[in-house]
Image: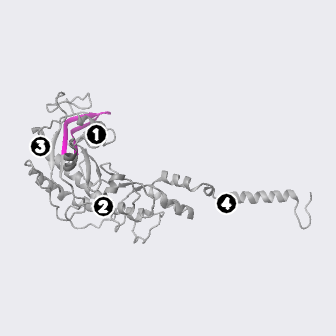
């Protein structure tokens, strides 16, 4: 059909309509076809708070949905230090019954040495200070911060206030608080309610990829004169061997223990604002990029903290540690799968004295899972080390509240 003077042929009309529909399809946002529940599931799988902040800038709908995400991961990049003057060392733990006055002197040295790392941790998590990328300048935080593309200009507490349905939270610090020499292994895992629930520490004076000369290793752990007698009752406790008293071995392990407990209690104290802002939270993990320490709180423990506020240790920014009972396992050498050798390997399991005495099952028997909270505290290959140490002779220590 030919084109009239003032009209178009039907074929031309259909072609023009087709082009118009194609243009509309190109402009249509296909995400609008997805229900909110599907988008929220996608956002929950993303998790990373910075990526979610960028998603919130895409559209008004995304901006409204991002605060409803219930699983978030916050990676702290770095912090603008205030470089405060060194604070006086906190009061050391009083010597526990049994003549452990030497611990007080060691604790005094430890507490004085990690004041600055704890201050830095406070700068990272405090809502009044800004977490930033390097070479960034932090603007004043807004009164009600929405999820934003560059959320690294705010502290974790400020950023997370935008999330209203938060249930699972994981925060990763840029580094561990405890400075250890190269080749030294120090890892800890602690859980808290309103106070410490339990803590497991794994340390080694050196980590190497092969056994030292004339020290062949053919099994997960070597035996020595302090190895346990297979016929010994599991609950039998022994005195600290003389070999650990020489060359500063016991002192070093006490330093590891107190330092790890203080680092854990400082993290716990500084999580209060986040926990108070999110009553829906039922799982919280605070880790570090070095893999040095892990603090965990489950739903029951979070609720316990909301109902029963924590006790502060003196003037320090950390939670008061209760009186503690500890079990220590030691091996001169442990070879792990892959040829990794731990020298001076030490495992320490810690629980509040009141809990141990109330349950009457010893430090190792904590809850229905029994001793698995000790042996399964770390990822491989260190889980193998913990299990090998757990089979060895057990030594007992105590520490008063500090």
Query: Is tag 3's residue or tag 4's residue first in the polypeptide sequence?
Result: 4
CB within 8 Å, label 4 to label 1: no
Q: Mark 2 points at which residue?
A: 270
Among numbered discs 3 and 2, the one appearing first in the sequence:
3
Q: How far apart are marks 1 and 2 (CA)?
A: 30 Å
Along the polypeptide, which appears first: circle 4 or circle 1?
4
Of tags 3 and 2, the one toward the viewer is 2
**Mark 3 and mark 2: span between their CA atoms?**
37 Å
Q: How far is the residue under mark 1 from the one under mark 3?
A: 35 Å
Q: Main secondary structure of the magenta part?
A: strand
Give the quarter of the figure containing the C terminus: bottom left
Give the residues drawn in magenta, as a range.
326-349
Side of 384 relative to 89 (left or right): right
Q: Can residue 286 be seen in this view?
A: no
Q: Quick one: 363 or 149, which is closer to the camera?
A: 363
Dot 4 crowding, Cα within 10 Å, few <14, some 14–19, many 20+: few
Residue 167 position, x and y percent, is 42, 55
Q: Which quarter of the picture shows residue 392?
A: top left
């Amino acid at each position: 059909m030919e084109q009239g003077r003032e009209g178009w042929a039907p074929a031309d009309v259909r072609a023009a309509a087709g082009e118009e529909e194609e243009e509309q399809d190109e402009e249509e946002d296909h995400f609008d076809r997805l229900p909110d529940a599907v988008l929220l599931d996608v956002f929950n799988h993303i998790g990373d708070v910075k990526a979610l902040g960028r998603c919130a800038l895409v559209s008004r709908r995304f901006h409204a949905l991002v605060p409803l995400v219930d699983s978030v991961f916050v990676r702290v990049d770095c912090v603008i230090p205030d470089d405060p003057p060194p604070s006086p060392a906190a009061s050391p733990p009083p010597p526990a019954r049994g003549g452990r006055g030497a611990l007080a002197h060691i604790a005094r040295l430890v507490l004085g040495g990690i004041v600055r790392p704890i201050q830095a941790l406070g700068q990272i998590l405090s809502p009044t200070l800004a977490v930033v990328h390097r070479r960034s300048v932090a603007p004043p935080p807004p009164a009600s911060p929405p999820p934003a593309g560059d959320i690294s200009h705010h502290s974790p507490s400020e950023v997370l206030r935008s999330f209203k349905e938060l249930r699972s939270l994981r925060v990763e610090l840029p580094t561990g608080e405890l400075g250890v020499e190269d080749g030294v292994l120090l890892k800890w895992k602690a859980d808290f309610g309103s106070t410490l629930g339990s803590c497991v520490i794994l340390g080694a004076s050196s980590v190497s990829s092969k056994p030292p000369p004339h020290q062949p290793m053919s099994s997960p752990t070597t035996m020595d004169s302090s190895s346990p007698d297979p016929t010994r009752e599991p609950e039998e406790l022994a005195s600290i061997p003389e070999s650990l008293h020489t060359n500063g071995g016991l002192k070093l392990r006490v330093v590891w223990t107190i330092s790890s407990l203080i680092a854990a209690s400082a993290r716990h104290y500084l999580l209060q604002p986040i926990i108070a802002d999110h009553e829906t939270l039922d799982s919280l993990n605070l880790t570090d990029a070095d893999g040095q320490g892990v603090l965990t709180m489950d739903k029951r423990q979070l609720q316990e903290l909301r109902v029963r506020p924590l006790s502060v240790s003196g003037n320090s920014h950390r939670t008061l540690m209760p009186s503690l009972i500890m079990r220590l396992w030691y091996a001169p050498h442990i070879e792990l799968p892959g040829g990794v050798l731990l020298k001076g390997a030490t495992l320490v399991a810690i629980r509040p004295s009141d809990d141990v005495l109330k349950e009457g099952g010893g430090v190792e028997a904590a809850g229905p899972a029994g001793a698995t909270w000790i042996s399964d505290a770390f990822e491989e290959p260190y889980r193998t080390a913990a299990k090998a140490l757990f089979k060895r002779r057990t030594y007992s220590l105590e520490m008063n509240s500090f």
